[in-house]
Image (tube, rainbow, N blue to C red):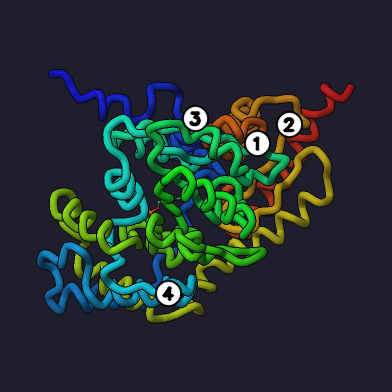
Amino acid sequence: MQLSHRITHLTGGGSDGWDVFYRARALSEAGEAVIELTIGEHDIRTDPAILRAMDDSARGGHTGYAEVPGVAALRDRVAARVQARSGVPTTRDNVLITPGGQSALFAAHCATCDAGDAALYIDPYYVTYPGTLRGAGARPVPVRTRPEDGFLPRPEDIAAAAGPGAKSLLINTPNNPTGALYDRTTLEGIAQVCRDRDLWLISDEVYDTQVWQGRHLSPRALPGMAERTLVVGSMSKSHAMTGSRCGWIVGPEEAIAHLINLATHTTYGVPGFVQDAALFALDQGDGMEQRVAAPFRRRRALAQRILDRQTAVRLLPPQGAMYLMLDIRATGMSDGDFANALLDAHRIAVMPGESFGQAAAGHVRVAMTVADEVFTRALETLCTFAAGCARPAAG
Ligand code: PLP
């Protein structure tokens, strides 16, 4: 039987750049000791206190269908958090609770794009973006950034890509994979293009608690932007709750009302006990968020010290998120060849930059998601390996 074009072309057909990841997993499963620095999953588990709140809620009977828009108390809590951090008046009517940030991204594009509309996104990007936009029926249009700009987008490039039929722009700050934190000037430039070209702005802020340098600014707070911005948030990264699948969309009331309707016909909400656990977690305030973010802050500093001592690999110091972008162009190798050779030689798995778009060619992404000593050893080995690769080219 024929399947839909929509589902069979979700990934665009080409290699998805995840070969190194799958090879590393296969080696691990075959019993080899592989250091996996590939995906964005914490090396700690969800805090036991959050799990107790989940258990209490489930045992207390919150196991039936939950309210589709989200439990009122959690919507209020998310609204208060967003208002406190951005200064934009926000109520529960601006909030839809979703099963994680990923489904929020899909829903946001369903809400903003009709079939065939152009949905812009910034390259390098979080791997699922083009497939998510395609799945929502939109036509993904990448806007390339440059390493020399710290991978910050130039508003004129966004304007040039926003041809007729462009409906939305998706940005991500702090950024996966580059670690870039969009500054006010960049965000004001982006906002200007959105207003001029009548674009929706979909702002993926799932890393907003992982900021190492500078301050996170939500573009929803910029003049004229609250009415055209959908902010995507999640408990996954902030509270090590990746498996709980709990996130949200914050946006204009009318858009949220329609998104609730979409949820009624797709997800039918998020389990009540998961939402109660998320509410408990958010009620713990900044302290818990900082504890979850602390290992990445520490490892970022470790990485900086290791990388400062050598010249074969260049670090673009991340301003946020849990990854390092390493420029390996001095080795003369492609990022895919480098990552595969590193896995073959040392059983260390990193993601080739091109898994995240053409703009990240010549780079590899390292997830800071293993214990400090393992992380240190892996980075030192990576640098020595890169220096060894660079030698023949230099000679
Ligand atoms: N957005 C970005 C930039 C991500 O890196 C991720 C996960 O890695 C997500 C969204 C989705 O997160 P979740 O669906 O777990 O909330």
Which residue is located at x 73 percent, y 31 percent?
329
Give the mark, 4 or 3, whose residue is nearer the N terminus. 3
* Foreground disc of the pair 1, 4: 4
Image spot of residue 221 (x, y percent): 49, 65
Nearest to the observer: residue 208 or residue 16: 208
The quarter holding residue 2 reads top left
The residue to which callout 4 is attached is: 83
Quarter location, residue 149: top right
Q: Are marks 4 and 2 in contact (CB under 8 Å)?
A: no
Q: Name the secondary structure under disc 3.
A: loop
Q: CA distance from mark 1 to mark 3?
A: 13 Å
Q: Which residue is mark 3?
A: 17
Quadrant where the C terminus is found in the figure: top right
Taking 259 as reference, is 94 above or below it? Answer: below
Q: Residues within 10 Å of mark 3 (few under 14, many from 20)?
A: some
Which element type, helix, strand or loop, lies under badge 1?
strand
Residue drawn 62% across and 43% down?
154
Q: Earlier in the sequence, mark 1 or mark 3?
A: 3
